[in-house]
Amino acid sequence: MLRALRLQLSLAMAVRAAGMRTDSIAPSFRRAILVRHGAVDRARAEPALKPGAFYGGNVDVPLSKLGEAEALAAARLIATDYGAQVGTIWSSPMKRARFGARAVGTALAAAAETWSPPLPVEEFEAFREIDRGPIGTGWTDLTPEEIEARDGPDAIWRCVNEQAPGVSPALDPSHRPYAPAVRRCANEQTLGAWRERNGGEGFCDLRARVLGQRDALLRTVPLGSAGVIVSHMWVTRAMVGEALGEGDPTKVEVPTASVSIIDYPDGFSAAAFAAGECEAPVVRAVGLKPQVAEADQPTVGDFTAPSLRQL
């Protein structure tokens, strides 16, 4: 775990020092450029969500003005530094991700030496954010405090770190960054276990669908080329955590509208990698957040501050 965190830091420092550019893609590799959507405005969700409340793949929360500016900045970065590599754009079907995906397509078209229409955006349900369960019976629109008052003081931590239904690992206060408990769901290893508890998903449910879809799409990318996936925090954590060998996804920091880059060897799949039957992916960057252009900065009246830990 510590090794993975150190690797993240060294990657971030190296790429920033190089002007946020990365190496070219090796001829026997395919590149995935992962983008998390920008900051959201819970008050504009349908229905509106209270400040600090959980949301996920079952509520279409739109971007804030800041989030739109962040998404445009990420799109410009991709077009400037990786535009010649990108041949496909994939997205979650949620509006907060679709905005960023379409921005990438527009930025790539604008940066091209000769005009061509923007690349189409293909949407996949598998890249939808983790399901927090329905409003009222699940965790959507509940704050962490409300969840723990209803479901127990370690409910969220159990959701992240549960290894099997009803079996909790030993509590380790040093591994609980979300007070007082936020990690069992993200390390749940039993498919469907959390559907019975809060009507939503555990991390293993999300990871299975995300990695399966990622593997299928990678096979369609020509060797030496790249595809862009614009999605969500937990979706990105699933792919980056796998590549880093980081067992706890809450340790993978992917800020809003950040860019992560992973090169996958030919023949890669989640199953083959887990079994040691293929080369390891090469992580080029994790959670790199481009600067928002001054012209795109929202006015004070438009500003919606993102939570540092949007769960």
Image: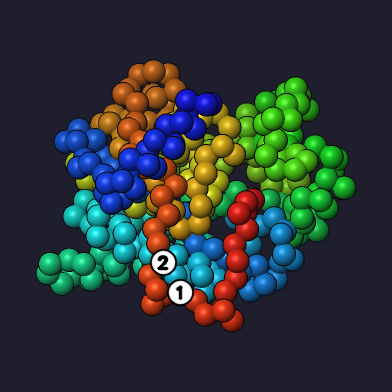
Q: In which quarter of the image is residue 14?
A: top left
User: Hey, which residue is sitting farthest front in the picture?
Assistant: 17
Residue density around tag 1, few if under 14, some if 14–19, many if 20 or more, within 10 Å: some
Q: Where does the image place residue 241, in percent across and percent down from the top left? A: 49, 35
First in residue order: circle 1 vs circle 2: 2
The residue that disc 1 covers is: 297
Q: Is residue 49 above or below residue 16?
A: below
Q: Where does the image place residue 29, in percent across and percent down from the top left? A: 24, 35
Q: Can residue 30 be seen in this view?
A: yes
| Element marked by disc 1 | loop
Q: Residue 292 carries which label?
A: 2
Q: Is residue 209 left or right of residue 49?
A: left
Q: Nearer the viewer, residue 229 or 192?
A: 229
| Amino acid at the residue labelled 2 | Val
Q: Nearer the viewer, residue 70 or 222?
A: 70
Which residue sits at x=37%, y=38%? 11
The image's colouring method is: rainbow
Q: Where does the image place residue 1, in percent across and percent down from the top left? A: 53, 26
| Amino acid at the residue labelled 1 | Gln
Q: In this view, does 83 lie above or below 247?
A: below
Do labels 1 and 2 touch, CB within 8 Å? yes
Q: Is residue 119 left or right of residue 215?
A: left
